[in-house]
Image (cartoon, coloured by chain):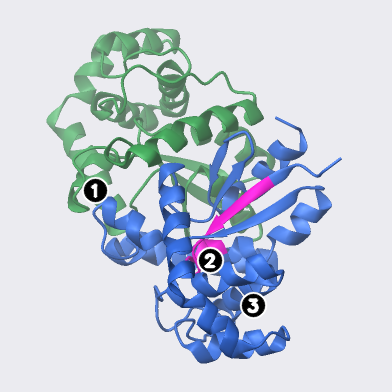
Chain colours: A green, B blue
Amino acid sequence: MAHPMLEFWFDFASTYSYLSAVRVRALAQAANVALRFKPFLLGPIFKTLGWDTSPFSIYEAKGRHMWRDLERLAADFELPFRRPVTFPQSSLLAARVALVGLAQGWGEDYSVAIFRAEFEAGERIDDPATSEAILAGLSVDPRSVLDAAQSDDNKARLRSQTEAAQQLGLFGAPSFRTAGGELFWGNDRLEQALDWVKQGK
Amino acid sequence: MAHPMLEFWFDFASTYSYLSAVRVRALAQAANVALRFKPFLLGPIFKTLGWDTSPFSIYEAKGRHMWRDLERLAADFELPFRRPVTFPQSSLLAARVALVGLAQGWGEDYSVAIFRAEFEAGERIDDPATSEAILAGLSVDPRSVLDAAQSDDNKARLRSQTEAAQQLGLFGAPSFRTAGGELFWGNDRLEQALDWVKQGK
């Protein structure tokens, strides 16, 4: 029998998506749940809510708490998080590359590596060099992947995925969605979402 | 030696404050942490963020997820939550009464009872009759308490408490604050905040 499935929707600019991305595969494996990585862009969704950037940048107190919260959670998870110089970063390039990779089998490894580069190594994910180095490490040809990522077809694919996210009622990241349409928002709900799927609800 | 202390900041209109209010005393007792209940009003703080009501009412998808999330969490906590007809309710009267009660020793019981009336029994907390019934059950004289609650002094006390919340960087409820100034936002952080205090951080 196929494993029950959970969709993991994330934006590469999202701090809490980082906390989920680096943990979700081991947790899903332990729960016997199959994952589907779903990169999308929060930006267009935030625009419909009237925000032109991250709410953590718009609302100062909320942002201040988020960074402290991240530090505390990363310490609990024993993750080497460090606050990046630039926030939020453009996640456009990384999301496009991830879509190519998810169709070719290396997308999950790439996604986790991008999050680590951004929130552990302090690198710029909008710099193609960051993706190129990660891709080379995954033994895929950076040049042909970046070309495929920037093709019209692939750009349209990311727009479709973002529109799908909005139609599913997503308003933040990470979000988790079951085959039955149950939606969980936030890294804080990762374990609950996996339990839900595992229990066949 | 005195128990280490945690402040519990809440708004009576807040759904996630309900989840904390009905759990916090048993958890704090188990952790040997002394609690200070701090009712305040989110409304004036939301106004400074540009919101004229709850963000769960302003942002539809966020509100839809919140109600479903509350149902799931209440089931996990085995709480008889039910979605009230009116949301958000005015928490002004309840907050004023709670301040009187916290100075007289029955404020915590009253606060928990108000949250249960609102989110379990579906009652209106802006109706004085709801407070009167709870107060009578606590063996205090409803008439004299409501008079004290609506006195100029007590109204000023609630305004001060709300200003203090804003100055401490609170932007939502529930929030938890340690004597050392560590701030935790959300019912999801209740256990972490108690651990923090318990470990003497």
Q: What element carries label 1?
A: helix
Say how many tags the image has: 3
Q: In this view, does B112 lie above or below A25?
A: below
The answer to which quarter of the image holds residue B52 is bottom left
- Residue B165 in percent (x, y) is at 46, 50
- Quarter holding the N terminus of chain B is top right
- Residue A126 in percent (x, y) is at 26, 19
Callout 1 touching callout 2 (CB < 8 Å): no
Q: What residue type is labelled 1?
A: Ile
Q: Is residue A194 left or right of residue A47?
A: right
- Residue A78 in percent (x, y) is at 64, 24
Question: Can residue B81 be seen from the camera position used here?
Answer: no
Output the chain of dot 1.
Answer: A
Q: Mark 3 points at which residue?
A: B113
Output the chain of dot 2.
Answer: B
Q: Is residue B12 magenta?
A: yes
Q: Is residue B18 above or below residue B83?
A: above
Q: What residue type is labelled 3?
A: Ala
- Residue B61 in percent (x, y) is at 33, 61
Numbered mark located on residue B70 in the image: 2
Q: Name the residue under label 1.
A: A45
Q: Residue sitting at 71 percent across and 88 percent down?
A: B137
Residue in the foreground of this view, choosing between A39 and A137: A39
Which region shows up in magenta? B6-17
Q: Distance between the residues labelled 1 and 2?
A: 23 Å
Callout 3 touching callout 1 (CB < 8 Å): no
